[in-house]
Amino acid sequence: MTKSRDQIAILIVDHQTLFRQGLQELLQVEEDLAVVAQAGTVDEAVTSVGHTKPDVILLDVELPGTDSATTLERIQRTSPDSQIIALSVHDDPLVVQELLRLGVSGYLLKTVSWQELVSAIRGVAAESDGQANRVIVSISRDSLAQTGDSGPLSGREREILLLVAEALSNAQIAKRLSITEGTVKQHLRKIFDKLDAVSRIDAVNKAAAASIIPARPAGPDPGAGSSTGE
C-alpha cells in the first residue's frame, strides 16, 4: 500500500480484522487519504509504524494483552511525528483525560459519523505541520456530566470501586466492564489519589464512610492479594 506525496498516510490498528478492512475500504474513497498499513496487535503496530512512518494512526486503545500507556509509549518512541487518534467504544471522560495526557491528538468513539472521522484525520494531520496544540475529542454530553456525580469520583470510578468492594480482581473487573486490565489500573490509581487511599480496602472503606458507595457488607476482603491496585 503506497501513497502519493500530497496524501495523508494512515495506519489502522485494531484487533478486529473486519473492522480494519471495512475502515480501509471507506478511507480509500477519499482522494487525499491513503491507508499504508494495518495492524492487529501492538507488536504489528510498532513494526508497521517503523516501516511506514504514517502521518496519522487510528488506534484501538483497548488492544488485548496490553495497556494503553505502554502501547502509546512504544508507538510514540518509534515514530514521534505520527499523530494518534484513539478509537474506543467507551464514553469515559477519565479515559479521555488520561489518553490526552499521554499525547494522543484525538479521541473518537467508534459510533462517530463518517464525516466526523474524516474531518478528525484531516485536522490532526494539519496540526502535525505546526505547533500541535489542539485536540479533537468526541464524547457525549451525558458522559461529561458524570464527572460531577458521585462526589470526587466519576461515574466509572464509582462503578469500578463497587466491583472492588465485591472482591473482584482487576482482570474480573476488566471482563465485567469490557475494558482492558490496564484501564482498570488507571482508574484505581485515580481513585486512590482522590480518596488518599493506600490500598483497595482502604479506598472502599473511605468511599463508604463518605457515602460515595454503600457500606460494604461482611464478606471477602477486597484488598486481598493487592495493596496498590496493580
Image: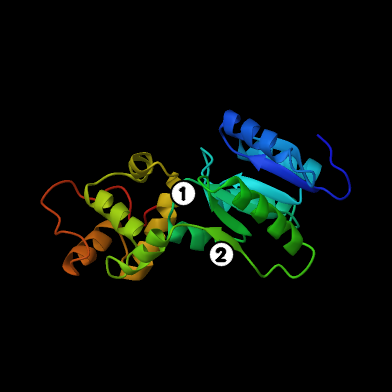
Residue sitting at 20 percent across and 50 percent down? Answer: 221
Q: Which of marks 2 and 1 is nearer the N terminus?
A: 2
- The 10 Å Cα crowd at callout 2, few under 14, some 14 to 19, many 20 or more, is few
Task: Report x, y in % for residue 64.
Answer: 51, 38
Query: Is residue 104 visible to us here?
Result: no
Q: What residue type is labelled 2?
A: Arg
The Cα atoms of the two marked residues, 2 and 1, are separated by 16 Å
Label 2 element class:
helix
Q: What residue type is labelled 1?
A: Gly
Task: Report x, y in % for residue 135.
Answer: 61, 64
Task: Report x, y in % for residue 146.
Answer: 35, 63
The mark lying in front, picked from 2 and 1, is: 2
The residue singled out by tag 1 in the image is: 182
Residue in the foreground of this view, choosing between 150 and 127: 127
From what the image shows, is residue 30 above or below residue 107? above
The residue singled out by tag 2 in the image is: 101
- The 10 Å Cα crowd at callout 1, few under 14, some 14 to 19, many 20 or more, is many
